[in-house]
Structures are given as structure tokens and as C-alpha cells.
């Protein structure tokens, strides 16, 4: 009799524990919002993807620590494309069909982004790219956004400075991938508007080790300045070759090399090079009343606390994308169409890249404040007036 | 006009010397084993990255670091041969080639884990300004590569043609079984050839690192260009490697200068096709096709 009672009690206890295990999470927490991330964490574009991945993860952790969004915890599902568009497509398919995410942040580069856009459009899945190419949001696709500055704004910033300096003839040298091609189009198209003439138009391969031939050809055209459009390590080779050839005209670079790594690998060859950059890189030199100062300081100190590392503008793209998504996810209950509508309605959001004003005809949303001209002097960035 | 032409030539020589020194590694192994090692570019990468560690991080004197890098990579080549090549039960050429491709992927991964993903800068060995010749500029480092690769070719030619070990290695490539019957330790020769070829890869990596920078994924492109240079000059021919490399580099530079920078690679490969069409064994490779 007594043994039987004990047995009943034990069975009951087990049942209660099991029930607790099964039902408790359901009773107290809502289902998790899964957010996809596709970045070039390794490979040639790792300087983009690695900080982007860490920035995205950091925001997700912060949101979860603060109790999630409307009670939903977030989960970041992040994949590494190694900079390969084919991998990007595979991972986008996986995120859409297997992980069933609510939105994707990334990819890091223009070629990988262009490759996944058709998939996201078909799946009606919001995509916030961290890549620079203007082709991502032009023509506008309802579900495709981006937080990185476009080469439109970068070229305009450089050209405005050149016009101010009274330059007339320029040579351009662009890397032969999506980033370079997109930059080249802008460099050619906007030149006339700023009274500039492109007198030499050359390209180079992303892994080329000597660009003296291109620079020699450019020199023959006697330009007032040369603009090189590429990402590491090509521009560092160009800088070294320019030093080797003792070119007598100034060198401009794209925002694609606006990271301390460029100064590191180009060494003293990068002295005097001018380029446009987001405010992240020069945050400590900005005045306290600069409108982005608070956002920048928070990002920089949070990142330092989380990873004990310095920030780059690239990580900022993913940071802004995730912050925008945080705003857009509120009150949607995981409805992807509502998330999309919310992103498009965001106005005056001050991020680390610039101030975002989205609209049905503007899916980048950044204004003129997203770029500042800097010069490399004594191994660091100097803001130019 | 002259000044530009000269500058294109110098640019071409800089690249060409890089291709040549890598091609030399391909040809050395091929002339001893009849094998093409598609991981050759990765041994070049290992050489460049090890130099960063020994010279820049540990602060060893450059000549000592140079020697240690070459020995270490040569040792890696020996390990590669013992573990991956010799253990193959049916050593068909195609199987071995696939193994080397696999090794290249493995080594690239190793490079990424060991040295990170960012390009690493290496200062020039010479604290000299670029040399000016008739208004065109040449890097001292490029000159150093051209001179070193010429010396290496001469030394290797002497080794293969005049020394007993060298002749024994050539014999192994021509007919392994016959060489074995003559009392040549064919396995030892293969091992030596691997050590020699990968060591040469390390020499290439060390010399080119100041120009190209060192990255874990630098090997694939350099390996491909080096292979093209070796084919162009005649696979297995040492002087051919030098000529093929310089020709490829100069063709690329002139292509940029006089046609279009966008068509640079197309022009270089067109040249390769043309030469291989006219002379299928490469410029200096005629003899090797008449092997048994």
C-alpha cells in the first residue's frame, strides 16, 4: 500500500516536471524572431564582413538583454559568403527556406548583394544590404534597402572638393569588379556637373600586383588628379606604385579603403591621399554638438566593451541596419510586409553612417551628411575643411 | 613615348619576375617527377606569411629569417610528399593532381587560421628610392627578384646537368622503373624534388612579399599565373620558366599600355594560346616531348 502510494507520487512528480519543461517556455516567452545575416566574414572582403557580423550580433544581444521586441527574443542566423556570390545565393536560399528568417542584413559586397536580390524579391523578404553599389536600390525594389552610402554621394563629395580646388582634368582607375564598375559609372556621369573632364579611364584586377602601367598611361594624359576606386589591397598597390613613379598629381581614393588597415598596408605611400568617409572613422575629432556625435559615441563604446576593438565605418552599416530593423520590427508580430512598410516609413533616424530618411522612392535614405573629406597625414585621418 | 614604353617594360618585368620565380617551382618539380603541383602557389603564400612572422614579428635578421623560411617550407613540402603523395596506392597523374588541388585548399585554410584574413604589409628589403632610368622608374626589389631568379635558374641548370644527384632526379622523371633498376633511390629523389620545389616556392614568397603584400589567398592567382608562365616557356625547362614569366608580364603591361587595361588578362592569355598553338611544348620545351 505504502509502496504503491510512493509510486503514484513519483509518477505525478515526473509528470509535473515534464509538463513544466514542455509548457513553461511557451507560457512565458513568445516565439523567437529570427534575423538572417549574410556577410563576407572571411576572404578578400573580410574587412567588411567581420566587423559587420560582430556589430549585428552586438545589437541583437543588446535587444535581447533589454527584453526583446514586443516580448519576442531575437536570434541572429549569420552565414559567411567568403565574398562569393554563389555562396551568398546558397545561404540566402537557406535563410529563406530552412531558417525562415523575417529579414536579412547584408550581404557585405555589391556583387553578393546583387546575387541575392532576386531571391529576396521573390520571397517578399526585407533585405537591408551593407554594400555600397548604387545598383542595389536603383531601380527601387520594394523589399530591398541599404544602409551603406552610395557611390553617388561618395563621388559627389570628392568632385565638390575638386571643383573647389579648381581642378579640371581627372584620371580614373577602377577595380574590375562590381564595386569598381559602379564607381566608374558615377565618376563618368557626374564629372560634367562639376566642370571636370575624365582624360584617362583605366581599370585593374583585384589581385594585380603592379599598376605602374595604368598609372603611366594616366600620367600621359596630364590630369590634375587621379581617382582610384577599389577596396584593399589594390589601392595600397596603387599608392605604392604612385610613390614609385613619383607622380606629381594628388591621389583620391574611394570610401572603400576608409579603414586603418589601408594606412597599415600602404605605409608611408598613403600620405597625402584624400578620400571621403563616414563620420565613424573620425568620431573623436568631431565637435561635441555634431548631430551624429551621440550615436557614434554609443556605438564606439559599446563595441569596445563587447569586443575590445576599434570600429570601422563598415561595421556601422550592419549596426545601422540592425537598429533600423529594431524600429521596424515593433508591432508587426513577425509580418514581413509590415516590417517592410515600417522601414520605408522611417524618417530622421540618426545612425552612425548618417541621417536616414526612407521613402517609397528612396531606399538608401542617406543625405549629404553621410560623407566627409579626409586626408591621410602622419598615419592618421585629418578632416579637410 | 620612349619613356612610357620603358615604364611599361619595367612594370611588366616586375610582374614577370614574380611569375617567373613561381614558374621555376613548377618546372623544378616537373623536371624531376613529371608532376604538376597545383599547391605551388600556396607554398609561395606560406613563404610570404612565414617571413612576416619571423622577420617582422620575431625580429630575426632578414638573412636568417630568409633561410629559416625556406627550410621550414621545404620541410612542409617533404611532409606533404610523405603524407599525401607517397601514400597513394594508385598514383595516376590525375589522382596526384587532384591531391595537390586539395592540398592547396587545405594550406589556404591553414594560412587563414594562422595569419588572419587581412593583407599584411612587408617593407622593401632595400631602403632605397625607386631607380630612375631615362624617366622611367624601377623598384630595387624588382631588380633583386630578376637577378635572384636568374642566378637560381643557372644554379639549378648546373645541378640537373652536371651533378650526379641532379642527373639521377632527371632520370626518375624520364623513366622511374628504369631509374630504379639502375640503383637510383626513386623515392628519395621524389622527396628531394618536393623539398626543392617547395623551397623555391618559399624563396618566391619571400622575395615578392614586399611588392604583393602577404595574404592567405594570394597563392591561387599567383599559382595560376606561374603555371601559365611555366607552360609558356615549356614545362620542365628552367630557362623557359624565366623567359615565360617575363614574356607574360611584359605582354600584360604592354596590353594595358597600348590596348586597354580591361583586356589585360585576355591579351596575356591570347598570347599563351597562340604560342601553345604554334609550339605545343612551349618556347623552350621542345625536347621534353620527345621523351620515351
Image: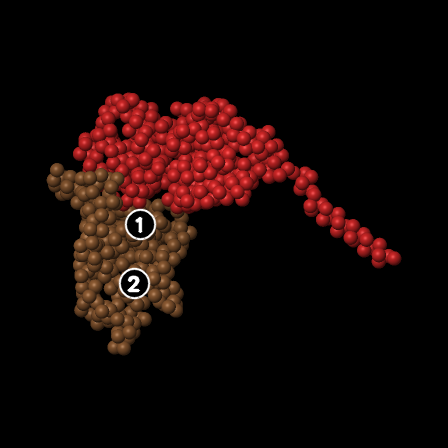
Chain colours: A red, B brown
Q: Quadrant of residue B38?
A: bottom left
Q: Residue furthest right?
A: A1
- Which SS class for mark 1? helix
Residue B35: mark = 2
From what the image shows, is residue B140 above or below residue B75?
above
Q: How many marks?
A: 2
Q: Quadrant of residue B241?
A: bottom left
* Contact? badges 1 and 2 (CB < 8 Å): no
* Residue B279 position (above or below residue B14): below
Residue B56 versus residue A225 in the image, above or below: below
Percent coordinates x, y for residue B8 in the rendering: 18, 42
Residue on which the image places disc 1: B221
Give the alpha-carbon distance from disc 1 to disc 2, as whole Å. 20 Å
Residue A195's disc number: none
Residue A312 shows in this picture:
no
Residue A12 image position (x, y, % from top left) = 78, 50
Taking the image as shown, residue A385 lies to the left or right of residue B17, namely: right
The quarter of the picture where the N terminus of chain A appears is: bottom right
Rendering coords of residue A339 (x, y %): 54, 30
Q: Closer to us: mark 1 or mark 2?
A: 2
First in sequence: mark 1 vs mark 2: 2
Q: Are marks 1 and 2 on the same chain?
A: yes
Q: Residue at x 33, y 24 (%)?
A: A385
Residue at the spot 24% in from the left edge and 69% down from the top edge: B174
Q: For label 2, count other residues whose C-alpha is less than 10 Å away and answer few (under 14), some (14-19) or many (20+).
A: many
Q: Chain of mark 2?
A: B
From this viewpoint, is residue A130 visible?
Answer: yes
Where residue A45 sits in the image (x, y, percent)?
A: 39, 42
Q: Relative to residue A385, is residue A124 drawn left or right?
A: right
Residue at position x 22%, y 39% from top? B260
Question: Horizontally, is B31 left or right of A361 in the view?
Answer: left
Amino acid at each position: 500500500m505504502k509502496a504503491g502510494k510512493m509510486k503514484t507520487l513519483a509518477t505525478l512528480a515526473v509528470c509535473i516536471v515534464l509538463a513544466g519543461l514542455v509548457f513553461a517556455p511557451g507560457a512565458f516567452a513568445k516565439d523567437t524572431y529570427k534575423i538572417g545575416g549574410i556577410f563576407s566574414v572571411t576572404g578578400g572582403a573580410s574587412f567588411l564582413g567581420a566587423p559587420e557580423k560582430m556589430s549585428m550580433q552586438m545589437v541583437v544581444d543588446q535587444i535581447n538583454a533589454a527584453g526583446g521586441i514586443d516580448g519576442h527574443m531575437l536570434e541572429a542566423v549569420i552565414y559567411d559568403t567568403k565574398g562569393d556570390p554563389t555562396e551568398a545565393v546558397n545561404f540566402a536560399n537557406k535563410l529563406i527556406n530552412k531558417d525562415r528568417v523575417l529579414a536579412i542584413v547584408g550581404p557585405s559586397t555589391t556583387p553578393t548583394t546583387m546575387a541575392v536580390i532576386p531571391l529576396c524579391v521573390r520571397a517578399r523578404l526585407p533585405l537591408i544590404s551593407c554594400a555600397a553599389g548604387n545598383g542595389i536600390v536603383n531601380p527601387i525594389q520594394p523589399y530591398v534597402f541599404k544602409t551603406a552610402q552610395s557611390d553617388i554621394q561618395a563621388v559627389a563629395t570628392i568632385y565638390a572638393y575638386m571643383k573647389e580646388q579648381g581642378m579640371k582634368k581627372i584620371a580614373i582607375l577602377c577595380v574590375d569588379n562590381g564595386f569598381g564598375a559602379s564607381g566608374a559609372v558615377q565618376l563618368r556621369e557626374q564629372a560634367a556637373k562639376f566642370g571636370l573632364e575624365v582624360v584617362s579611364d583605366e581599370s585593374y584586377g583585384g589581385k594585380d600586383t603592379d599598376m605602374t602601367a595604368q598609372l603611366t598611361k594616366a600620367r600621359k594624359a596630364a590630369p590634375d588628379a587621379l581617382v582610384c576606386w577599389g577596396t584593399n589591397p589594390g589601392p595600397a598597390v596603387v599608392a605604392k606604385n604612385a610613390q614609385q613613379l613619383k607622380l606629381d598629381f594628388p591621389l583620391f581614393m574611394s570610401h572603400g579603403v576608409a579603414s586603418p588597415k589601408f594606412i597599415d598596408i600602404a605605409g608611408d605611400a598613403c600620405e597625402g591621399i584624400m578620400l571621403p568617409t563616414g563620420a565613424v572613422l573620425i568620431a573623436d575629432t568631431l565637435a561635441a554638438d555634431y548631430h551624429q556625435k551621440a550615436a557614434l559615441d554609443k556605438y564606439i563604446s559599446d563595441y569596445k566593451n563587447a569586443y575590445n576593438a576599434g570600429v570601422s565605418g563598415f561595421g556601422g552599416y550592419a549596426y545601422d541596419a540592425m537598429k533600423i530593423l529594431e524600429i521596424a520590427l515593433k508591432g508587426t508580430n513577425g509580418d514581413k510586409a509590415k516590417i517592410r512598410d515600417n522601414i520605408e516609413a522611417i524618417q530622421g533616424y540618426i545612425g552612425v553612417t548618417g541621417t536616414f530618411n526612407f521613402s517609397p522612392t528612396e531606399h538608401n535614405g542617406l543625405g549629404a551628411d553621410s560623407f566627409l573629406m579626409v586626408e591621410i597625414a602622419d598615419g592618421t585621418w585629418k578632416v579637410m575643411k | 613615348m620612349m619613356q612610357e614604353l620603358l615604364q611599361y617594360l619595367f612594370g611588366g618585368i616586375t610582374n614577370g619576375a614574380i611569375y617567373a620565380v613561381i614558374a621555376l617551382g613548377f618546372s623544378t618539380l616537373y623536371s624531376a617527377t613529371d608532376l604538376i603541383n597545383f599547391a605551388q602557389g600556396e607554398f609561395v603564400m606560406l613563404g610570404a606569411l612565414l617571413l612576416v612572422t619571423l622577420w617582422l614579428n620575431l625580429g630575426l635578421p632578414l638573412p636568417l629569417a630568409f633561410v629559416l623560411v625556406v627550410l621550414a617550407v621545404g620541410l612542409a613540402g617533404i611532409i606533404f610528399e610523405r603524407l599525401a603523395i607517397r601514400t597513394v596506392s594508385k598514383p595516376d597523374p590525375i589522382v596526384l593532381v587532384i591531391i595537390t588541388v586539395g592540398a592547396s585548399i587545405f594550406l589556404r585554410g591553414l594560412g587563414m587560421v594562422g595569419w588572419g584574413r587581412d593583407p599584411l604589409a612587408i617593407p622593401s628589403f632595400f631602403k632605397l628610392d625607386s631607380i630612375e632610368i631615362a624617366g622611367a622608374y624601377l623598384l630595387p626589389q624588382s631588380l633583386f627578384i630578376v637577378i635572384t631568379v636568374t642566378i637560381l635558374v643557372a644554379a639549378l641548370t648546373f645541378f640537373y646537368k652536371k651533378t650526379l644527384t641532379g642527373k639521377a632526379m632527371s632520370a626518375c622523371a624520364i623513366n622511374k622503373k628504369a631509374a630504379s633498376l639502375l640503383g637510383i633511390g626513386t623515392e628519395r629523389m621524389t622527396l628531394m624534388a618536393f623539398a626543392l620545389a617547395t623551397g623555391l616556392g618559399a624563396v618566391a614568397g619571400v622575395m615578392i612579399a614586399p611588392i604583393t603584400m602577404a595574404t592567405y589567398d594570394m597563392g591561387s592567382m599567383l599559382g595560376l599565373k606561374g603555371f601559365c608562365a611555366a607552360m609558356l616557356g615549356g614545362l620542365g625547362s628552367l630557362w623557359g620558366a624565366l623567359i615565360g614569366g617575363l614574356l607574360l608580364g611584359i605582354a600584360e603591361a604592354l596590353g594595358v599600355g597600348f590596348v586597354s587595361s580591361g583586356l589585360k588578362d585576355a591579351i596575356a592569355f591570347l598570347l599563351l594560346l597562340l604560342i601553345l598553338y604554334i609550339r605545343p611544348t612551349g618556347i623552350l620545351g621542345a625536347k621534353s616531348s620527345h621523351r620515351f
